[in-house]
Image: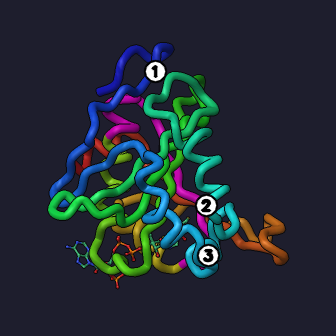
Amino acid sequence: MGGVVDDLSLHPKYPVRTERLHLRPLTAADTDALLAYRSLPEVCRYVPFAPMDKAVIADRLAGMWSVTTLTDEGQALTLGIELATTGELVGDVVLFFHSRAHRGGEIGYVVNPSFEGNGYATEAARALLKLGFEDLGLHRIIGRIDERNKPSAKVLRRLGMREEARLVRNEWFKGEWSTELDFAMLAEEWQAQR
Ligand SMILES: CC(C)(COP(=O)(O)OP(=O)(O)OC[C@H]1O[C@@H](n2cnc3c(N)ncnc32)[C@H](O)[C@@H]1OP(=O)(O)O)[C@@H](O)C(=O)NCCC(=O)NCCS
């Protein structure tokens, strides 16, 4: 399990390998592959960003996507999901380090619609839970979604995360009230299902 409680940090060895995927930091060489899905309105429907153009992607690559380690709360680690066989970038995942005191984090994921239906989001998100619990030393990791985002709820359930709360019309999101479903997993639950 992770390190000393008050000395939490994550320094993954890249690529992080799963059965079919490699997770690794994004680079400028990924721009067109990122644009292929992050520019699509249907992909952005329930996520907290608008369809992106090349300039926004360049800005993110130079900013929050340049993070490769987690050393303090408030940081987020975004990793590209690459197919081990072909090297294609099929999506990306993010691990937020919310709180050092409470050892809390959160996961998120986006997959190119052309590659949906293969289990890649679940496989990549499971690797993030492992990094969060076993290497960073988190105590609790959450997933928060709009309740209309059924494919995303299925990902969180497949991961074995517990549905904990339904927050009715709690956020003004993209021009309408959004009802939020909150999922969570504790470190001991992660250990128990391994
Ligand atoms: C949410 C999102 C990542 C889900 O993508 P997805 O491809 O359905 O999820 P997975 O990669 O886990 O794939 C699961 C599907 O692949 C199928 N599958 C096929 N082969 C599989 C395999 N070898 N292993 C596991 N699942 C497999 C599963 O049966 C499942 O299909 P089902 O949902 O019809 O039962 C995707 O819809 C997306 O990017 N949406 C836009 C962004 C977004 O909303 N992100 C979440 C923000 S909270």
Q: Residue at x 24, y 61 (%)?
A: 83
Q: Which residues are magenta?
A: 131-149
Q: Residues within 10 Å of mark 1 (few under 14, many from 20)?
A: many
Of the two numbered discs 2 and 3 in the rendering, the one whose residue sits closer to the viewer: 2
User: Can you say whether 193 is above or below 41 in the image?
Assistant: above
Q: Position of residue 6 (x, y in %)?
A: 50, 14
Q: Which of marks 1 and 3 precedes in the sequence?
A: 1
Q: Residues within 10 Å of mark 3 (few under 14, many from 20)?
A: some
Q: Residues within 10 Å of mark 2 (few under 14, many from 20)?
A: some
What residue sits right under mark 2 in the picture?
Answer: 54
Q: Which of marks 2 and 1 precedes in the sequence?
A: 1
Q: Is residue 141 visible?
A: yes
Q: Which element type, helix, strand or loop, lies under badge 3?
A: loop
Q: Residue at x 43, y 79 (%)?
A: 113
| Amino acid type of the residue that numbered disc 1 sits on in the rendered structure | Leu
Q: How many numbered circles does the render carry?
A: 3
